[in-house]
Amino acid sequence: MVCPYAVVYVLKNPRNNIRLGITSSKKIGNAVCRNRARRVITAAFRSVLPQIEAGCDFVIVARSRIL
């Protein structure tokens, strides 16, 4: 899924758990801005976690508009 705020990649995994990976490049800003973007993504992911089926890997790439 692609949107102005992030790009989300979803892959099935053989395990019965959910894994999350978050990346943010220097295009977003300094370390404070990048960490804030990661915190925003983590909070949003936790809010929808009960609705997600087990056995998926998520990689979320933050974009500059997320801040």
Image: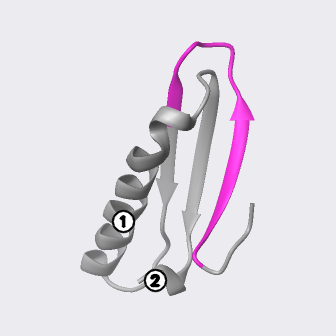
Q: Image quadrant of residue 13?
A: top right
Total marks shown come to: 2
Looking at the picture, how far across and down is residue 22, in whole percent? 48, 54
Q: Quadrant of the C terminus?
A: bottom left
* Mark number, residue 18: none
Q: Residue at x 31, y 61 (%)?
A: 39
Q: Image quadrant of residue 41?
A: bottom left
Q: How is the image coloured?
A: one colour
- Residue 64 as seen in the image, left or right of residue 55: left
Q: Residue at x 52, y 86 (%)?
A: 65
Q: Image quadrant of residue 26?
A: bottom left
Closer to viewer: mark 2 or mark 1: 1
Kindly report the distance in space between the C-alpha atoms of the residues bearing marks 2 and 1: 13 Å
Q: Residue at x 73, y 68 (%)?
A: 2
Residue 48 lies, with reference to residue 1, above or below; the image says above
Q: Nearer the viewer, residue 64 or 5?
A: 5
Residue 17 lies, with reference to residue 27, above or below; the image says above
Q: Which residue is mark 1?
A: 40
Q: Amino acid at mark 2?
A: Ile
Q: Which residue is mark 2?
A: 28
Tell me whether the residue at label 2 lies in contact with that at label 1, contact meaning CB atoms closer than 8 angstroms: no
Q: Residue at x 50, y 73 (%)?
A: 25
Residue 15 lies, with reference to residue 18, above or below; the image says above
- Residue 37 as seen in the image, left or right of residue 14: left
User: Who comes first in sequence, dot 2 or dot 1?
Assistant: 2
User: Start and end of the magenta stretch?
Assistant: 5-19
